Amino acid sequence: MNRKYRKTVIAGNWKMNMLASEIKPFIEELKANMPAKRACDVVLCVPGVMVPAMVKSGKDAKVAAGGEDCSCFEKGAYTGEVSAAQLADVGAKYCVVGHSERRQYHGEDDMLVNAKAKALLAHGVNPIICVGESLEQREADLTMEYVAYQVKTALSGIDATALRHCVIAYEPIWAIGTGKTATAEQAEEVCEGIRAVIRKIYGARPARAVSILYGGSMNAKNAAELLAQPDIDGGLIGGASLKPADFATIIAAANQE
Ligand code: 13P
């Protein structure tokens, strides 16, 4: 973390878990466990249908609501899709795009991720753009090359002003939901590399200001070490964000200097 230049963001990604009716008790327990004074933004990204309940319950606890995906289209005949305007209208402040599960199960590519990020930016919702390599790519020593490509493509046509509203999440696919976390060194190396890619495109100042999160089996035990890395500005947390006490511990770790 480097709070002098950029904000720390602790974002949960609930994926397709929990029910809207479980949000209020969850937030109450989270509130009871997390520090009242916080040096980070706390976000819970939830299925679109649950965003209004998260907005309502999260308000008091200063927990922002986020979506997990959105359409790249503005509006129209796209049955089943949720638009960026609709997310913004119900109070979402953030939205995940390009999660590896979307890429894997829904065939999403980097151009689509770019279009989704732009749609969100047009409606004042901060995109959390996910990137990350597979195990095969890591073993073939292709990690940085691939992640650099993902970052460049996802940010294509986004200017420096809009970049300020973007968050990048580095999520190595092999670490997601596997209990196998990247070491702090591995995670820092790629997050630093992502910042270098952004620096090449936008220059030093905008690159310094972008929050880059790590995601992939981040939990109450390993969060402090990961967050102590200079280029890791927070976390995108799946499993551990479903447990209020664990999520609160991660938030507390983000409060450390
Ligand atoms: P886990 O924390 O469950 O590994 O999930 C990470 C993730 O995919 C967050 O988007």
Image: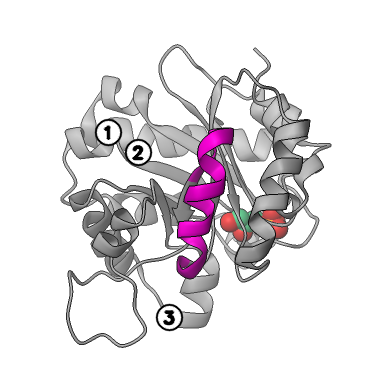
Pick the front one: 89 or 240: 89
On whether ligand 1 comes within 8 Å of the CB at mark 2, the answer is no
Q: Give the range drawn in magenta.
A: 48-64
Res 178 quadrant in image: bottom right
Side (left or right) of 204 relative to 47: left
Residue corresponding to mark 2:
197
Asked if the residue under mark 1 is in contact with the one under mark 2, i.e. CB atoms within 8 Å, the reply is yes
Res 117 quadrant in image: bottom left
Residue 24 in picture, x, y percent from top left: 65, 52
Looking at the picture, does residue 186 appear above or below residue 95?
Answer: above
Residue corresponding to mark 1:
200
- Residue type beneath disc 3: Gly
Looking at the picture, does residue 84 appear above or below residue 224?
Answer: below
Q: Earlier in the sequence, mark 3 or mark 2?
A: 3
The residue sitting at 54% across, 60% down in the picture is 46
Residue 72 in picture, x, y percent from top left: 25, 69
Label 3 SS: loop
The residue sitting at 17% across, 69% down in the picture is 74
Q: Disc 2 versus disc 1: distance between alpha carbons?
A: 5 Å
Q: Disc 3 versus disc 2: distance between alpha carbons?
A: 25 Å
Image quadrant in which the N terminus is located: top right
Side (left or right) of 95 relative to 198: right
Residue corresponding to mark 3:
107
How many marks do you count on the picture?
3
Pick the front one: 257 or 33: 33
Image quadrant in which the C terminus is located: top right
Is 58 in the magenta? yes
